[in-house]
Amino acid sequence: MEKLKLLLVFIAIIGQLVGIVLLFINIKIAIIVYIVYALSIFIMFFLLMLEKRKEKKEDEENDYRDY
């Protein structure tokens, strides 16, 4: 999971930089790069939400405040 998140961050950074350069060279390819960039951002947020829910569930299961 950590490698996937790292890969998505790398894709987001490279996608943004390459997209800016491609705007001056070829607009169609730049649009495709920006779509891939946006998808990587959405997938990354989705994975972070799933991870946060999992941590919250684990915290609720290991809640010892009532002792």
Image: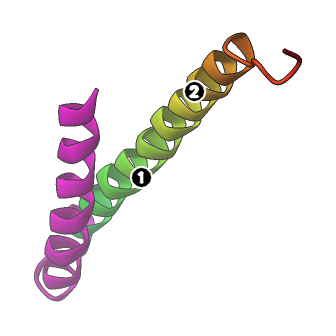
- Mark 1 / mark 2, whichever is N-terminal: 1
Would residue 28 be counted in the magenta stretch? yes
Residue at left offset 14%, top offset 72%: 18
Amino acid residing under circle 1: Ile
Q: Which residues are magenta?
A: 1-29
Cα–Cα span, label 1 and label 2: 21 Å
Give the side of residue 21 with respect to residue 34, left or right: left
Which of the 4 image quadrants contains residue 26?
Answer: bottom left
Q: Residue at x 32, y 57 (%)?
A: 37
Residue reaching furthest to the right: 66
- Residue sitting farthest toward the top: 61
Question: Tag 2, which secondary structure?
Answer: helix
Give the x, y percent position of residue 50. 55, 27
How far from the left and from the top, in percent, is residue 62? 66, 14
Residue labelled with disc 1: 41
Residue wearing tag 2: 55
Task: Give the percent coordinates (x, y) of residue 16.
Answer: 25, 72
Mark carried by residue 57: none
**Residue at x 17% of width, y 34% of height:** 3
Q: Quadrant of residue 53?
A: top right
Q: Residues within 10 Å of mark 1 (few under 14, many from 20)?
A: some
Amino acid type, label 2: Glu
Q: Nearer the viewer, residue 63 or 28?
A: 63
**Taking 20 as reference, is 31 left or right?**
right
Q: Is residue 60 above or below residue 42?
A: above
Mark 2 is surrounded, within 10 Å at the Cα level, by few (under 14), some (14 to 19) or many (20 or more) other residues, namely few
Q: Quick one: quadrant of the N terminus? A: top left
